[in-house]
Image (cartoon, rainbow, N blue to C red):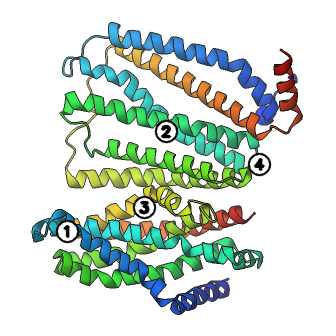
Amino acid sequence: MSASLRFTTFAAPARFYRLATALNPWLWASAIVLTVAGLYVGFFVAPTDATQGESYRIIFIHVPAAWMSMVIYLAMAFWAAVGWILNARMASMLAHALAPTGALFTFLALWTGAFWGKPTWGTWWVWDARLTSELILLFLYLGYIALAASIDDVVRGDKASALLAIVGVVNVPIIYFSVRWWNTLHQGATISLTAAPKMAQSMLLGMMLMTFAFWAYAFAAAFTRAQALALERERDTDWVRSLSRAGAAR
Amino acid sequence: MSLAFRAIYARDLRLALRRRVEALLPVAFFIVAISLFPLGVGPEPQVLRQIGAGIVWVSALLASMLSVGSLYSGDHADGSLEQMLLSGQPGFVIAAAKAAAHWTVTGVPLVLAAPLIGLLLDLRGPALAALIFALLLGTPVLSLLGGLGAALTLGLRSAGVLLILVILPLTIPALIFGAGAVGAVDSGVSPSGHLSLLGALLILTGLGAPLATGFALRIALE
């Protein structure tokens, strides 16, 4: 690797591949270690909640997953836009690699939310503004993934899905506020997550550990997927050939 | 620029006039789809009045999305879309003219069919007026967003279903405010708030969607 690092250094798929190869073991390891630690703190150390009992413990997965679902959508749109505007192949690949992870976290947030809602609210699902907009976020992810997968031409697929991701980002606030307003008109704010009592120190620790674990997982999964995409798309280049020769010789 | 807009708009209208039955398919779909709901949920006027606006809006959404798929595909197949883009006209002018033509051919009949639908679903007086105004403001939004979806999925194998999956989440605000206007009248509130928001949505979409559609067309034909 060259001594001087620039913003564009890792835009080259070959260099990105080497960077990801070097980072991935650490990322996967820290994802596993942090998850184990976070779940231990969440399930065994953190005290029982005064009002919600044990069922509140799902938040150690639910809240970080919900955060990640939104952060990843922004990151995906950002890299898709960079890939489109600057013609950076690797950025587009990274955007594609982020989408399934984002959709997974969105689904996880909805699923764990349902698990939390059943004992707490007495129902798996309510058409609450947050739940509804999270569901729509899942639809946006699915639309992006479906569009990217349906276009055979790589360049067109990258650009068209980038445009869709950007339009989605512009629309997310509009959708969120319209859903919120719709919700308040229809049933009133029955349940509020914002009125949660102050958290115990160990609860916060568990939440932070799980958040870092999910970040590490998101990086690891996206990098691994981006590596696979890079190998597939650049299969006719020298660096992939020499890589596969080295692999065959080993 | 406005010359190109008018030329494309007039051309699309003329094409629609030559295939009259085809142009009336969306509004036929709209009416048939709506008349299925009473058969499904029961004919009680009270229930129908309550869910009527939602039914009308969802059906309008689907009618627009199903018909918008062919907005660019015919011109794409015979090469005239490429010629339009090569003519040096900005992409957004072409996109705006196409969306305007789509609205005139499919959106306006939906609005005109609304009084008839009102009879079927027992929507009367101010509620029906709110529905018509909301459709008048909302159906152009559907045509504009649908045009974007049609450009993104141009020439793809499963374009029809894909377009619906990609664009429907973006149309949710129009659905909420459109159906909400009628709901506001039902609960004794003025619908002007909803209609204003729908108008704001129309302005925003009118400014943004043609630009994005123009980009999408160039991406598709590169």
Q: Is residue B85 left or right of residue A213?
A: right
Q: Residue A34: x, y in percent?
A: 50, 13
Query: How far apart are the two marked residues, 2 and 1, measured between alpha carbons?
Result: 37 Å
In the picture of the structure, the residue carrying the numbered disc 3 is B171
Image quadrant assignment for residue A126: top left
* Front of the two marks 1 and 3: 1
Using a 10 Å C-alpha cutoff, classify the residue at mark 4 as few (fewer than 14 neighbours), some (14 to 19) or many (20 or more). Answer: some
Mark 3 vs 2: CB contact within 8 A = no
How far apart in space, not on screen, are marks 1 and 4 (Cα)?
Answer: 54 Å
Tags 4 and 3 on a common chain: no
Residue position marked by numbered label 4 in the rendering: A87
At a point 76% along the width and 28% down the height, the residue shown is A17
If you read the primary sequence from the N terminus, does the residue marked by circle 1 or circle 3 appear first? 1
Residue that numbered label 1 is attached to: B39
Q: Disc 1 residue type?
A: Leu
Q: CA distance from mark 1 to mark 3?
A: 27 Å
Residue drawn where x is 44% and y is 30% of the image: A65
Badge nearest the viewer, 1 or 4: 1
